[in-house]
Amino acid sequence: MTHTQSDLDLTVSRIIRAPRTRVWEAWTTPSQLEQWWVPKPATARVVDLELRPGGSFVTEISETGVTFGPHIAGCFLDVVDGERVVFTNALTAGWRPAADPFITAVITFADHPGGTEYLATVMHKDAATAAQHVELGFHDGWGTVTRQLAELAEA
C-alpha cells in the first residue's frame, strides 16, 4: 500500500479497458514498453528491463528516432507479478546509489469491472522536487503515456 503525501507525491490513474494480464504485459515486455513509455512523437528504447528487486531499469529517449539519450537509469525495488512494479532512479542496478535521484514510482494494476485500474504514484524527496516535476510537465507527460499504454492494451 502506498502512503500518499499530497505535497510529495503525484499520481495518475486510469481505468484501462483491457484485462490486467494484458496491461501488465504491455508494461513488462520491452518491445511493448517502447511503444508507449514516452510521449509521441518521441520514441523510447529499452536498454535493460530486469524485473526483480535490484534489477536494472534503463530506458533512452529520442526526439528524432535516430539519436537516443538518457531517460531512466534506475533500479526495481519491488516486482509483484501482475500487481505492482516499484522503481527508482535514486539507485541503479544492484542497489548502487545514483548521482541524481529524482523519483520513486509505485505502479499498481488491479482488476476492475471495466478492465484494469492502473495507478502510478510518483514520490519525491521534498515538496520542492515535486513542484519541479509539476513544472516539468508531470501531469501532461505521465497522463499522455498512460493514455498511450491504454491505447496499446485496449487494441
Image (spheres, rainbow, N blue to C red):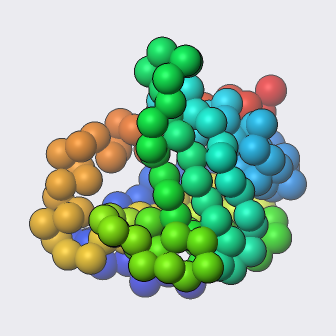
Residue 34 located left or right of residue 154 = left
Q: Is residue 122 left or right of residue 118?
A: left
The percent position of residue 82, horizontal first and vertical second, equals: 81, 65
Q: On the rendered image, what quadrant is the N terminus found in?
A: bottom right
Nearer to the camera, 11 or 68: 68
Residue 64 location (% of width, % of height): 48, 15
Q: Is residue 50 above or below residue 38?
A: below
148 w.r.t. 10: above or below:
above
Residue 54, how many percent across, how many down?
Answer: 65, 79
In the depicted view, which residue is nearer to us: 79 or 140? Answer: 79
Residue at x 82%, y 70% (from the top left corner) = 81
Report the quarter where the C terminus lies. Answer: top right
Lateral position of residue 129 relative to residue 109, left or right: left
For residue 122, what is the image quadrant? bottom left
Seen as rendered, the residue at the extreme left is 128
Count how many numbered circles sit on residues in the image.
Answer: 0
Q: Residue at x 68, y 54 (%)?
A: 48
- Residue drawn at (41%, 59%) of the image: 11
Q: Is residue 24 visible?
A: yes
Q: Quadrant of residue 93?
A: bottom right
Q: Nearer the viewer, residue 62 or 152?
A: 62
Position in image of residue 35 (x %, y %): 67, 30
Up the image or down, 36 lies above or below 92; here it is above
Confirm whether residue 153 shows in the render. Answer: no
Vertical comparison of 110 with 32: above or below = below
Residue in the picture at 35% in, 36% down: 140
